[in-house]
Image: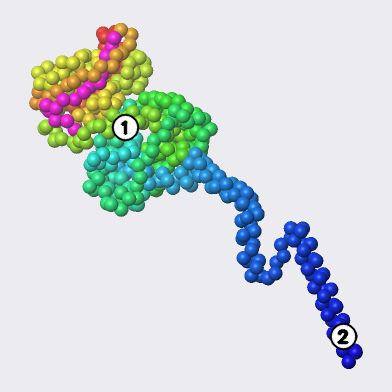
């Protein structure tokens, strides 16, 4: 019995000591700031409270840091994008253009008989959607992409192809504006396309990265990239000198003409011109700056969209003209354009404001460089309509730009075929390019090789004749 009592007393003593020890440890821990965690349920309930109450400053600081990091990449994205981002955002505003051109073929068949026939061949180019008005979608491209066209069609990003018409052209800037009626564009296409944002080409610096998008080789949209290699480049071509161009090492291939050159913000800073590039030279492509393009857009977008009128109803300026080509202009210090050397007698055109020796450079603000371009524009106007004719008028040792209002005359009074025959021998221009120097450009007295009245001549004689004629009109 005493033994049992001793065991119980020992157990009680051990329990008391152990309990006292546990209480002492707990008190010491609390004094040291160490939380005593009794169970998993207590940890779950007390841990958030402890975190919120003990370290609010620690949780607030990281939150502020994360907010700043989220804004900064967005700012960087808005200022400098990747090539893929630029391409993705810009492609809906770039289109492919197909120009059906009438091509005349002359030659002998395998049977030896002479053949002369015409056929239509497609030519490819690009364009940029730059805006719309109440009835039309407007597309900017190069003038050489659409010249001599029998028909034009535009293919959008969703592969929808729609016919387009020329709203206006400026051959001196090699730019043209196309129009498509909004009613002809499907809703799905309108939802797929975007209007390009023109940037400031003057702010571009040499070394800036750029992206070119266009219908290269007619295969559809393709993307190339490079840098701005130079600014304000002058490039000589067979038709004259193009000045103030952007030079880039981004690949500009046939079919890219009229496409977009973009900065890394996705803004159009240039309209690419493939014809100024050469297959024998690498890394030298050219683009018309957006600052120059914007002026042309402002002028052409206000024009009425016109179609060719029947020949019998077309208006005439009532003048006899001849081309001043790039070579002649450079040799004699004259503007390139269409030279007026005589006014047609008996015309009912009200053209008193036009003077002999004037050089026509624009019709209704649309720049021209030769007679063909002049005739193409006039083919859209009826007799009796008024047009604004911009001429370069000699004034001493310089030329002044003058704009004249002319009411077009009718064909029966302004057609100079009959009068030009009698003046053919006195017209030093008649042997220049095979035309008779009349406004309509037809030559009744020229033979197949372009020599007037079958006479032979050489370049020296022709040049001397022109000099003698021009010397009569010394400035």
For image coordinates 26% across by 8% down, the residue present is: 472
Q: Secondary structure at mark 1?
A: helix
Residue at x-position 9% and y-position 26%: 412
> Is 392 part of what is drawn in magenta?
yes
Where on the picture, by quarter, is residue 154? top left
Where 183 sits versus 246, above or below? below
Instruction: Specify whether 62 is left or right of 435.
Output: right
Q: Which residues are magenta?
A: 380-395
Instruction: Name the quadrant containing residue 132.
Output: top left
The answer to which of 422 and 12 lies nearer the viewer is: 12
Q: What is the tally of numbered marks visible in this picture? A: 2
Mark 2–mark 1 Cα distance, whole angstroms, equals 110 Å
Is 391 included in the stretch rendered in magenta?
yes
The residue indicated by pointer 1 is 297
Residue 180, x across and y down, in percent = 26, 43
Quadrant housing the C terminus: top left
Within-10-Å neighbours for mark 1: few <14, some 14–19, many 20+: many
Name the chief secondary structure element in magenta.
Answer: strand
Residue 447 position within the rendered picture, expressed as x and y whole percent measured from the top left: 22, 27
Q: Secondary structure at mark 2?
A: helix
Closer to us: 410 or 120: 410
Which mark is nearer the camera, 2 or 1? Answer: 2
Query: In the picture, residue 290 is in which quadrant?
Result: top left
Q: Residue at x 34, y 47 (%)?
A: 193
Q: Relative to the observer, which residue lies in front, 158 or 362?
A: 158
Q: Position of residue 95 (x, y in %)?
A: 35, 44
Q: Which residue is mark 2?
A: 7
| Residue 231 pos. (x, y %) | 47, 27
- Can you tell which mark lies on residue 282? none
- Image height of 142 relative to 457, above or below: below
């Amino acid at each position: 019995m005493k033994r049992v009592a001793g065991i119980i007393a020992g157990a009680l003593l051990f329990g008391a000591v152990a309990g006292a020890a546990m209480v002492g440890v707990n008190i010491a821990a609390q004094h040291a700031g160490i939380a005593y965690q009794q169970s998993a349920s207590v940890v779950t309930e007390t841990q958030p409270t402890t975190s919120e109450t003990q370290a609010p400053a620690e949780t607030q600081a990281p939150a502020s840091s994360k907010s700043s990091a989220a804004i900064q990449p967005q700012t960087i994205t808005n200022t400098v994008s990747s090539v893929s981002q630029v391409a993705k955002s810009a492609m809906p505003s770039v289109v492919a253009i197909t120009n059906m051109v009438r091509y005349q073929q002359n030659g002998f068949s395998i049977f030896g008989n002479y053949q002369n026939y015409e056929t239509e061949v497609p030519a490819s180019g690009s364009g940029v959607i730059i805006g719309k008005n109440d009835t039309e979608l407007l597309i900017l491209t190069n003038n050489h992409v659409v010249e001599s066209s029998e028909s034009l069609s535009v293919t959008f990003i969703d592969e929808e192809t729609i016919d387009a018409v020329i709203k206006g052209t400026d051959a001196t800037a090699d730019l043209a504006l196309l129009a498509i009626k909004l009613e002809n564009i499907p809703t799905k296409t309108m939802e797929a396309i975007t209007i390009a944002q023109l940037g400031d080409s003057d702010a571009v610096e040499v070394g800036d990265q750029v992206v070119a998008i266009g219908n290269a080789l007619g295969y559809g949209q393709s993307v190339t990239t490079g840098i701005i290699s130079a600014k304000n480049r002058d490039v000589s071509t067979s038709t004259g000198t193009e000045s103030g161009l952007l030079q880039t090492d981004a690949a500009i291939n046939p079919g890219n003409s009229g496409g977009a050159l973009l900065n890394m913000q996705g803004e159009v800073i240039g309209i690419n011109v493939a014809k100024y590039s050469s297959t024998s030279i690498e890394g030298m492509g050219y683009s018309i700056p957006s600052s120059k393009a914007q002026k042309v857009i402002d002028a052409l977008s206000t024009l009425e969209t016109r179609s060719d009128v029947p020949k019998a109803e077309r208006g005439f300026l009532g003048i006899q003209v001849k081309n001043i080509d790039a070579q002649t202009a450079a040799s004699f210090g004259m503007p390139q354009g269409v030279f007026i050397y005589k006014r047609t007698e008996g015309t009912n055109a009200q053209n008193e404001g036009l003077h002999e020796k004037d050089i026509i450079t624009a019709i209704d603000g649309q720049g021209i460089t030769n007679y063909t371009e002049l005739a193409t524009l006039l083919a859209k106007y009826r007799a009796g309509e008024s047009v604004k004719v911009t001429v370069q008028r000699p004034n001493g040792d310089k030329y002044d730009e003058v704009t004249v209002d002319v009411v077009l005359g009718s064909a029966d009074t302004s057609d100079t075929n009959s009068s030009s025959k009698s003046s053919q021998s006195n017209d030093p221009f008649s042997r220049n390019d095979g035309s008779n120097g009349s406004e309509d450009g037809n030559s009744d007295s020229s033979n197949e090789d372009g020599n007037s009245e079958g006479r032979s001549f050489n370049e020296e004689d022709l040049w001397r004749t022109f000099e003698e004629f021009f010397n009569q009109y010394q400035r």
